[in-house]
Amino acid sequence: MIRTDDSLATALLVSRLAGDGHDTLKASEYWSLSVPPGDLLGRSTEELVDIGFDDGMAERIAKLLDRSVALAFELDRYSEAGIATVTVHDEGYPIRLRERLGDRAPALLHVSGDVGLLSEAGVGVVGSRGVTEEGAALASATAEWATSLGYPVVSGGARGVDQLAMGAAHQMGGRVVGILAGSLVSDIGKAETRRALLEGNMALATPYSPEAPFSPGTAMGRNKLIYSLSTLTVVVASDHGTGGTWFGAVEALRRGFGRVAVWRGSGEGPGNAHLARMGARSIESIDSLDELLGEPDEPVVAPPEPTQEALFTG
């Protein structure tokens, strides 16, 4: 999907493909560029300095832009495997990411399946891997409810709540968006995943290299995308003070990545009550989700926790 100079330059500046030794731009660095990225193509280090970059950044950008042949080879290789590369300058990039995440939004995604699904506000379903039987039933019921209303189900593909929700939606013939923190190549190699992709009801995406392994860091990056792509994200079960589900929900609440609802009832995790106190909307039945969907799609930012100083003053 790399079609324009801006798109090509973006891929060269932020993609970790075509060699691990390149110091690619972080999201905040990319979004702070003072000129369109396409205007940087073909410029020497000296010319980059002349238009306002310091010596270090100019040299860094020049090196990144000087790998177009190697990057094109890698992108073609993944394209042949069914993985498209979408930058913020390409049709199909979900603008909700930029709107919700600001300068934390990834400028590039690798996607397999129906890219258009990423731009449809879905219902996120997240939760711990070690979910109880009651929590598992709720994860499936939430996904079935979202599917019945025509919403894509957005989740992370991890064992437990994520896979249960995505599987329930798929079984109903619904649409599924999986934001991955591990290898996209490995996932699309699974027979069941390939069938869903061929049916056109699934999109799998990652802001990381298509073969990047799972890590706590990639999991946190994945979580913020789930919240920002969803009109509402339901936390089925969360630990308290630990785990990706907990930290992802806390970050979403504090930074306003998306609307967060949390299950209160049989099957909830020890962190659910704490998330509710932080501002997540409590739900005690699937029916109450209808009311939440009718509300404006505007995240509510949780107030910051008081500092030690604030606790003993005023």
Image (tube, rainbow, N blue to C red):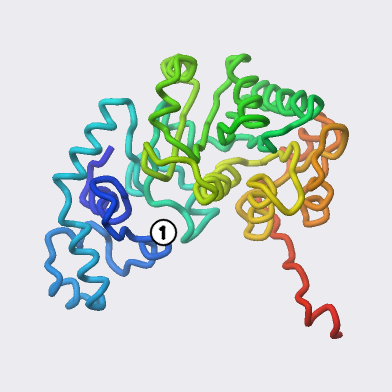
The answer to whether 214 is drawn above or below residue 20 in the figure is above
Circle 1 is placed at which residue position?
27
Amino acid type at mark 1: Ala
Q: Residue at x 38, y 51 (%)?
A: 107
Q: Residue at x 53, y 31 (%)?
A: 177
Task: Choose top left, top right, bottom left or bottom right for residue 13.
Answer: bottom left
- Residue 173 on image: x %, y %: 58, 15
Task: Choose top left, top right, bottom left or bottom right for residue 124.
Answer: top right
- Residue 161 on image: x %, y %: 67, 31
The N terminus lies in quadrant: top left
- Residue 26 on image: x %, y %: 39, 60
Q: Secondary structure at mark 1?
A: helix
Question: Quick check: can you spot residue 96?
Answer: no
Q: Is residue 21 left or right of residue 213?
A: left
Task: Choose top left, top right, bottom left or bottom right for residue 142.
Answer: top right
Q: Is residue 116 left or right of residue 161?
A: left
The answer to whether 75 is drawn above or below residue 14 in the figure is above
- Residue 208 on image: x %, y %: 40, 45
Q: Residues within 10 Å of mark 1 (few under 14, many from 20)?
A: some
Residue at the bottom extreme of this rendering: 313
Q: Residue at x 61, y 30 (%)?
A: 159
Q: Is residue 216 left or right of residue 6?
A: right
The C terminus lies in quadrant: bottom right
Question: Quick check: can you spot residue 50?
Answer: yes
Tally of marks: 1
| Front-lying residue, 203 or 219 | 219
